[in-house]
Amino acid sequence: MKNISIPFLLIFIQSIVVYSQYESVRNFQKEIVENEITASNIFMLYKDGKVVYLNAENSNLFGDKNISNQSYKPYKETLFPIWSMSKPITVVGIMILLEKGLINLNDNVSKYLPEFSQIYCKGDSGKYLCKNPLKIIHLLTHRSGYGYYSHKGYGYGLTSTVKYKNLNDFSKDLSKVVLEFEPGEKYYYGVNQALLGRIVEVVSNKDFYSFLREEIFEPLEMSETKFHLTSQDRSRFQPLYINFGTIKGFTDELDELTYEESNNAFFGGEGLISTMNDYANFCTMLLNGGTFKGKRIISEKSIQLMTKKYSSSYPIEEFADTRKLGFNYGFSMFVLDDPIVDGTGSTKGIYGWSGYHGTHFWIDPEKKMFGLFMTRHRQSISNMDVQKELRRVVYNLSK
């Protein structure tokens, strides 16, 4: 019999223990594929300074692409549209300007974008000149009055890379849109971070993508996070899985954003593409209180500002997400305030955000942990809240 070295045996046993410990997480990933809730998906759990779990669960369905994580090997990883997970990145960009003393949170938007000096609000008898000025903090907290969708039906559809080629034109058009209510009055999820991107351009005298690349992406080694796809990139771009019951399959026809290299409408609310490992670096920075590999990106004070309560959960805020009961809202961050109402066993104070096509993350400062999930699906026939149920599985691991 061939001798097996003790170190090798210990590593082998340790790997079995680790796999067994997280088997329920992998089973959950498999379950949502088998039940056609998502197609291929990937999940990372990071704790105490290291990745403790990373698994891609592939569907092998016709039209799907197997997810490749190729750990920290650029130009091989699967690319995902992260949609609203762009928002926390934009917020960090604003915090950088704040720390440099270039803006104040209570500045009027019109100080930087004069087209917003006269804005109109909806009233019972038509529109009227808003009484309150629109401020930067209103955009950060989604209390501006701008939405994506009107509560009376489909909204303006303004963040379109088909319609706009730059943020300046977008800003001028948005200034003509009538607000749903007075700035600062209510929480109403919308296009706010796209406008923040334009403010960054004016203040920094750089296009928004260049600013993010220099201030965030390069220090965080996020080389694959961008607003465009090259022809080579498109071969690694995860297809969209749709399941409406009678209509089911994979498509590239519902991308909604073009991701063309020539387009300079860098929408900071929804426009970014990223990879698992790139976004994990962003999460690591947040978990580390604003630092990454010894580099300070933002201060701990800025993270505290980002995760402070500015809006309550539904039903106190009538337009808040009904799936986020027990959570308050910061700067495009949900923050868990009442773990009992949430009911997953998650730690009070966790914070994070999600994207339109199923990506999401959360940071747990107390447990020194973050979870990052990526997939690409839309409007499944299932009513399962994947974010909530995945957290339930993770926080039940220690029980």
Image (cartoon, rainbow, N blue to C red):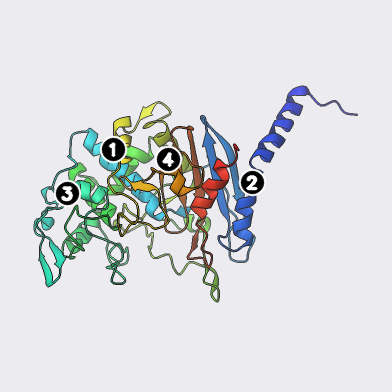
Q: Nearer the viewer, mark 4 or mark 1?
A: 4
Decide: few, some or many residues near mark 3? Use Cα within 10 Å; few <14, some 14-19, many ≥20: many
Q: Nearer the viewer, residue 122 or 73?
A: 122
**Considering the numbered disc 1 on the image, is that residue within a helix, a strand or a loop?**
helix
The mark found on residue 24 in the picture is 2
Q: Position of residue 270 (x, y in %)?
A: 36, 55
* Disc 4/disc 1 C-alpha distance (Å): 14 Å
Depth check: 83 or 216 in front?
A: 83
Q: Secondary structure at mark 4?
A: loop
Dot 3 and dot 4 residues touching (CB under 8 Å): no
Q: Amino acid at mark 2?
A: Ser
* Residue type pointed to by label 4: Ile
Outermost bottom residue: 246
Task: Name the disc covering residue 350, or none.
Answer: 4
Cα separation, mark 4 vs mark 2, equals 21 Å
Secondary structure beneath dot 3 equals loop
Location of mark 1 (residue): 305
* Location of mark 3 (residue): 135
